[in-house]
Amino acid sequence: MGKYKLSKFFNLQACTKCGNCLINCPVLNYDINKAKLEIKKLINLEDSEVLYHCHSCFSCNLFCEYSCKPYNLILYNLFIRYKKYGLPPTAKLVLPNETFNLWNGLKSILPQYEKNIIKEWSKPLKNNILLVGCFTQIFPYLTDSSLLESLNPRGTEKFWCNAGHIYQLGLFNIVDKIGEILLNKYKSCGIKKIITFMEAEYSMIKNIFPIFGHHIDIELETLSHYLLERIRNGDIKLRNRLRGKITIHDNCFSKSLGEDSWNINRDLVKELGLEIYEMKHNKKSSLCCGFGAACYSFSVLDIIKQAQCRLIEAKSVNVQAIVVYCSACLFILSVAKELLQIKIPIFHVFELVQLAMGEKPIHNHSERAWDIISIFTIHLIYSIFSKRFKIKNNLIPENSELKLSFNFNILKIINKLLKIKLLRHFYVCSLKDY
């Protein structure tokens, strides 16, 4: 594969083919013989059923006692598949350089005040920045807080979430290009510190881009760590001690950071006064929100099915809410919650900090979920008549203006129709057959 050799990503010499990474996988749960068979297939780049069932969640790396990075081995096999077959048309939803994607769809139906927030994020980079991320852009209102005013929020979908979700799909050549473009951009603008709204973007700069040869001397901090430190040193005053029982959903990229990420977010929630009840699968064995469940198939049904597992597991611990610290998880679980009619509130940890300091978060997740569902609907119809494809070379198009087309006009109609509760009910009922 030219510059993308397996040995660059996976430590073949250290691997004993013991299969422990797959035995302990919270999704696969193979016995030892099956695990050994499938790991050999992956190493030999043969057709393995792992590729059809993996949720791209990083857990296998944590169960390898020799630090071989079996997750990268799986991603490498997905990369081989991509180079040979391309991607299903539904993948265009999460590709920022496609005309009709998730972000452009939302831009055509967002209220003006949220468009104004995104416009502010598009301003030139300077000094230190809060990198909000492309999936936070689904919820621009989430950042409407005095807590973030001085942090210089930047980063629209054209920053590709620092290639976080692209890496989870195994698209190594695209990750490589994005890493080169973005790190050169940060360097040329003299950025000295980045606070990331998502762990994914922190991990990509700190751990993943260096694998591809892209390094930057920069101070990095996650938003959760920033908030926890400011609460502890008194810069953020907590006026309302929160009460209640919650459970925390650990995102996939938190596993690439380990105990630090898990502990910081739990300590932050405890500082606010809340009790934490752990789900059966948490921290290193945490289940995917649903996004990674479609890393091979790109099936929306696979995503919803996995999200359902996660929501049901959360309800089983008898808590008042799920807390997430990843905007992508908030996006997926919010959509699934509406479609499956599972009654449990979902909060981003930042919203809880707002509540504790006396701010009222906008918390429009339910309505935003239906905005996303309307985009999914038209995209699924569109994809029926489309073929597999490979990602275009122009990752960051020069023309950033949104040109409305037939698809966007149809989207507006569907979005308005789905504001009607009766039609929402009909939509939900129609999914039960699947």
Image (tube, helix red, strand yellow):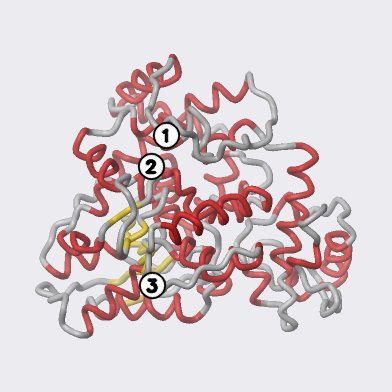
Say few, some or many: other residues with alpha carbon within 10 Å of mark 3 (under 14 / 14 to 19 / 20 or more).
Answer: some
Q: How far apart are marks 2 and 3 (CA)?
A: 33 Å
The residue that label 1 is drawn on is 373
* Image position, residue 232 (x, y; %): 23, 84
The residue that label 3 is drawn on is 221
Closer to the camera in the image, 298 or 200:
200
Give the structural element (helix, strand or loop) at label 2.
Answer: helix
* Image position, residue 62 (x, y; %): 64, 76
Compared to residue 56, the image places residue 233 above or below, namely below
Badge nearest the viewer, 2 or 3: 3
Q: Answer left or right for 86 relative to 184.
A: right
Badge nearest the viewer, 2 or 1: 1
Q: Residue 338 bears which disc, if any?
A: 2
Q: Residue 80 bears which disc, if any?
A: none
Compared to residue 265, the image places residue 428 above or below, namely above
Give the structural element (helix, strand or loop) at label 1.
Answer: helix
Closer to the camera in the image, 272 or 151:
151
Q: Which residue lies furthest to the top in this view?
A: 406
The residue at the point 64 percent across, 22 percent down is: 386
Q: Do the residues labelled 2 and 1 touch (CB within 8 Å)?
A: yes
Give the total number of marks visible in the rendering.
3
- Ranked by sequence position, the earlier of labels 2 and 3 is 3
Q: Distance between the residues labelled 2 and 1?
A: 9 Å
Badge nearest the viewer, 3 or 1: 3
**Mark 3 is on which residue type?**
Glu
**Mark 2 is on which residue type?**
Glu
Closer to the camera in the image, 341 or 195:
195
Q: Do the residues labelled 3 and 1 touch (CB within 8 Å)?
A: no
Q: How far apart are marks 3 and 1 (CA)?
A: 33 Å
The residue at the point 88 percent across, 53 percent down is: 46
Compared to residue 370, the image places residue 311 above or below, namely below
